[in-house]
Image: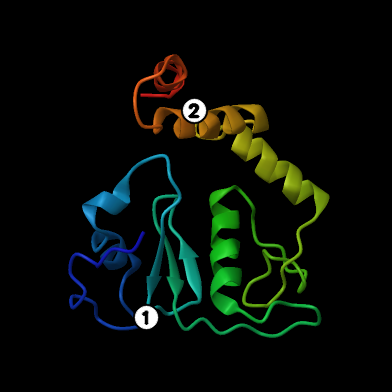
Amino acid sequence: MSEDAVAPDGFKGAAAEFDEFKAARPAKGRDAGMIHVYYVHLLSTNGVFMARDAIFVKDTAALRSVKGGVDEPLPRVTSHEIGHAMGLPHRQDTINLMASGTTGWSINDAEIARVREWAGKQEWILDPQAAFDKKLYDILAELPGEHDLKAKAKAALPR
């Protein structure tokens, strides 16, 4: 989803305080229990994680190239900041996703385990069977007309 900032002209430039960015978020973009990423033009760093509800990524991010790294800075910086939201700290192994300012993308088994642990604590995470069931219920609930399966699917969907 894309939303306009509340006060896009109110920034002081690259030296703007991060709280100014946080205050410019539209009300719709402040829902709790979600990871919110905002792309901004003026930012003194490539990205900043300010708690899960406020991740800012510079739309002109520039990274130091490393052997085997990715060549698209926006997805890489976004992934790095979301890594912080999922509990990953910086790790200055140049090919690692959590290295600062590089094109590195890899994560190790310990980092994977940490993200899985984090995900297991989120109420919005579904196990594979639950995700399949929910998608199936969504499809059935949207069918035209009336049918017992449609009523059961609607009853099974979270409210």
Q: Position of residue 63 (x, y in %)?
A: 61, 82
Q: Position of residue 138 (x, y in %)?
A: 46, 32
Name the residue rendered at 44%, 76% in the picture.
58
Q: Is residue 49 above or below residue 125?
A: below
The answer for how far apart the CA atoms under marks 1 and 2 are is 41 Å
Graded by Cα atoms within 10 Å as few (under 14), some (14 to 19) or many (20 or more), the crowding at tag 1 reads few
Task: Tell me whether circle 1 and circle 2 mark residues in contact (CB < 8 Å).
Answer: no
Total marks shown come to 2
For residue 94, the mark is none
Q: Is residue 6 above or below residue 11?
A: above
The earlier-in-sequence mark between 1 and 2 is 1
Name the residue rendered at 60%, 48% in the picture.
87
Residue at which label 2 appears: 137
Image quarter for residue 108?
A: bottom right
Report the front residue among 68 and 139: 139
Residue at which label 1 appears: 41
Q: Is residue 74 above or below residue 55?
A: below
Specify the amino acid type for callout 1: His
Q: Position of residue 64 (x, y in %)?
A: 66, 85
Q: Is residue 136 left or right of residue 159?
A: right
Report the front residue among 35 and 159: 159
Report the front residue among 91 and 86: 86
Q: Secondary structure at mark 2?
A: helix
Name the residue rendered at 47%, 34% in the picture.
139
Q: Please identify the residue farthest to the front as the structure is shown.
A: 145
Q: Secondary structure at mark 1?
A: loop
Image quarter for residue 67?
A: bottom right
Q: Is residue 153 left or right of residue 87?
A: left
Quadrant position of the C terminus in the picture: top left
Q: Position of residue 122 (x, y in %)?
A: 53, 34
Specify the amino acid type for callout 2: Tyr
Quadrant position of the N terminus in the picture: bottom left
